[in-house]
Image (cartoon, rainbow, N blue to C red):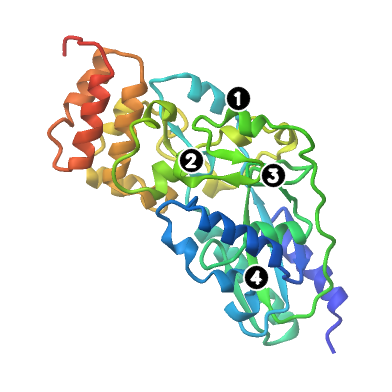
Amino acid sequence: MIDVYQLATDIRQWASELGFAQTGIVQPQLGTDHQHLLDWLAQGQHGSMGYMARNTELRAKPEQLVAGTCRAICVRKDYGTDDAEAWRTLADGERAYVARYALGRDYHKLMRRRLQQLSDRIGSAIGSFGYRVFVDSAPVLERALARDAGLGWIGKHSCLIDRSNGSWFFLGEILTDLPLPVDAPASAHCGTCTRCIDICPTGAIVAPYRVDARRCISYLTIEHHGSIDEALRPLIGNRIFGCDDCQLVCPWNKFAKRHDEPDFRVRNDLDKASLADLFAWTEAEFLTRTEGSAIRRTGYQNWLRNIAVALGNAPSSVATIAALHARLEHPSEIVREHVAWALARHTSLPV
């Protein structure tokens, strides 16, 4: 007979040893969150992310996704960096802003590997059991599960927030058939604060707890393919992959823990790189430098598209104009379109 209370205690200890900052356990009951998802989809606020509209029933019923599921073991992995440096980059129109989570190696593989190690440790202690590991890898409402497992509340910007640790963290889950004791859900503490809503550059947070992906810079620079709406381009600023404004301004992030995970350390000087330098990368260089990085997801064409927009928003200079002219005849129609738009934003300078 397994002592599930002792096992839950052991799981938390093993998770901590693997570098997870917090672990919570929940019995999935996601009816309200499922309805919120369906309403969001019905309004088309998922944009072109068609995968969000697939398998919606599985998102609400994890036991159908993994047979026998009665619990979710939810973990948190911190990745907080220097907020002051982030603000400095945003203020410097010649530098490229990359979302803090993407500055180092792709978190998916690291998280998945460690969750598998945690599962293996459980198996070593109790024998075979039913489970499956998830890190953004299937239709799972991870923030709702993490909230109900006590890891934090879903803020008005839709990110999870913990009152003692802010919101700079990744989430992962193990769906399992182990009847472990569950944790109390987290209570919400946004109160009347609307800083995240007020600061959003494109007004993508259309209401508390509601993000319209079609206006979100993270969606536009990562998930969206094709041309970016001209009305939104000036609002993107120098953000070339993702956006952190709503988290940077959140008062709870003054409590965020700074990480020391080697895999999350900055690669390719992306925390201070210039737009012109990144725009000069060849496709081969892009593929080499983004190996093992979340940035690879956007693809080379969209990488150039995004930087072209940022260069269009940059201060006019000889270097900026020269960088854009160098891509004016790029084979991609999408790149050429955004380069032409960017050049039109600048006054004529000798090149």
- Rate crowding at label 4 as few (under 14), some (14 to 19) or many (20 or more) other CA atoms within 10 Å: many
Give residue 258's position: percent from left, percent from top: 66, 38
In this view of the protein, can residue 344 be seen by the observer?
Answer: yes
Amino acid type at mark 1: Ala
Query: Residue 108 location, x and y as percent?
Result: 52, 58
Q: Residue under circle 3?
A: 155
Residue pictured at 16% horizontal, 9% vertical: 350
Q: Is residue 17 something one can see in this rendering?
A: no
Gap in angstroms between the C-alphas marked 2 and 3 = 16 Å
Identify the residue at image location x=55%, y=28%.
86
Q: Is residue 336 left or right of residue 306?
A: left
Secondary structure under tag 4 reads: strand
**Helix, strand or loop status at disc 3:** loop
User: What is the CA distance from the residue labelled 4 to the residue labelled 1?
Assistant: 35 Å
Residue 114 position within the rendered picture, expressed as x and y whole percent measured from the top left? 60, 64
Q: Position of residue 73 (x, y in %)?
A: 71, 68
Q: Is 262 placed left or right of 51 in the picture?
A: right
- When asked about the image quadrant of residue 329, the answer is top left
Q: Which mark is residue 84?
A: 1
Structural distance between the alpha carbons of marks 1 and 3: 22 Å
As helix, strand or loop, the secondary structure at mark 1 comes to helix
Q: Residues within 10 Å of mark 3 (few under 14, many from 20)?
A: many
- The earlier-in-sequence mark between 4 and 1 is 1
Dot 2 lies on which element?
loop
Q: Earlier in the sequence, mark 2 or mark 1?
A: 1
Q: Mark 1 or mark 3: name the one nearer the start of the chain.
A: 1
Where is mark 4, residue-wise? 174
User: As displayed, is residue 80 above or below residue 1?
Assistant: above
- Residue placed at 71% from the left, 38% from the top? 256
C-alpha gap between disc 3 and disc 4: 23 Å
